[in-house]
Amino acid sequence: MRRLLFRFLGLTILIAGLFAGWQLMRYQNFVEAPLNIEGEGTDIEVAPGTPFSILAARLEERGIISDDRLLVWLARFEGVAGDIKAGEYHVEPDTRPLQLLQQMVKGRVKQYSLTLVEGWTFAQVLDAIRGNPYLENTLADLDHEAIMERLGLAGEHPEGQFLSDSYRFPRGTRDVDFLRRAHRAMQSYLEAAWEKRDEDLPLQTPYEALILASIIEKETGVPEERPAIAGVFVRRLNRGMRLQTDPTIIYGLGEEFDGNLRRVHLRDSDNPYNTYRHSGLPPTPIAMPGREAIDAALHPADGKSLYFVSRGDGSHVFSATLEEHNQAVIKYQLKGRARPFSSSP
């Protein structure tokens, strides 16, 4: 009887050992084999508060893993089952189970991108943000003043306050947080650039530099010309000459501008952005300047030119005298058919 019992126990131990060895082999194969992901990869969404066992079961249902229990064992063995961070993850082919766990523990979530383009107005920035499906919209029904209050910038004009750049962010980022980030980026760059500015500029504050940079941004079709255009504006400001720049007129007209700037706009429009009638800088930026425009405003090119006119291809002709400028206007803008409407400041 005892011999039979020992045989039974031995057989049981053998079977248990074989089973354990088989499970260990399955576990080892599971850990070393890549996940079942093909093509360009797949996205995995982890909702806040999801138990790891539920997450593993969903991955098995999708066919990404062969056995959810093996992933749970791996997570427990590594001590990370409770450290998975919520978010959307993009998982590449050839990813191993342990790499997947590490990605989720470190919160390396999928990133989306939105580019704020140099020269955009704040209205265009809002259109881009509101049209992005990966940002959470919390500002949809607010006007510009209320949005600035939400940003903690009550009473400040929004134009030009956000740095043009490509920003990466995870799905579900709030639009207000996106704007805060772009605003901090602008303040950081502007403050650093201001500290390195040229001497004897007719600018008293970083905000005035931002205003000038926004005008340079809107006037420049050829990036290499930004310092030259900045030089013209700086020399005019130093001499007390009016800037006489069309983009400020257009900005001041707002919705009244129909795409055709007329002589009457320059002569009769009396808003503070009419730099043909008012001296100095306009009261606020007129668009969102990029880094290069800010640098140009703070490091203008030397020279004698006080005027410039577009050739029609994005580049400009620069002139030192009004007579030279008027001839350039006739040649490049009016094709010799009429007198230029520019006048001496």
Image (cartoon, rainbow, N blue to C red):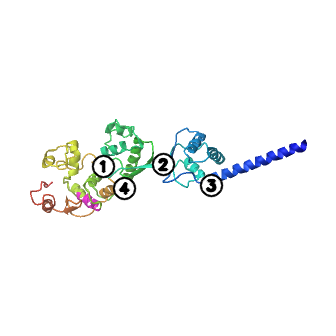
Q: Which amino acid does label 3 sit on?
A: Glu
Labels 1 and 3: the sequence-earlier one? 3
Which residue corresponds to mark 2? Answer: 110
Residue range in magenta is 224-232
Q: Which mark is residue 32?
A: 3
Labels 2 and 1: the sequence-earlier one? 2
Is mark 4 in CB contact (under 8 Å) with mark 3?
Answer: no
Residue farthest toward the bottom in the current orientation of the protein: 303
Q: Look at 60% across and 47% down and name the residue there.
A: 66
C-alpha separation, residue under disc 2 versus residue under disc 4: 33 Å
Q: Which amino acid does label 1 sit on?
A: Trp
Closest to the observer, 330 or 282: 330
Is mark 2 in CB contact (under 8 Å) with mark 1?
Answer: no
Q: Which amino acid does label 4 sit on?
A: Ala
Closest to the observer, 184 or 164: 164
Q: Main secondary structure of the magenta part?
A: helix
Quick one: label 3, few (<14), some, or many (20+) residues within 10 Å? few
C-alpha separation, residue under disc 4 versus residue under disc 3: 51 Å
Is mark 2 in CB contact (under 8 Å) with mark 3?
Answer: no
Q: What is the quadrant of residue 128 in the picture?
A: top left
Q: Look at 31% across and 56% down and name the residue there.
A: 293
Say whether residue 240 is left or right of residue 168.
Answer: left
Q: Which mark is residue 120?
A: 1
Q: Which mark is residue 154?
A: none
Q: Nearer the viewer, mark 2 or mark 4?
A: 2
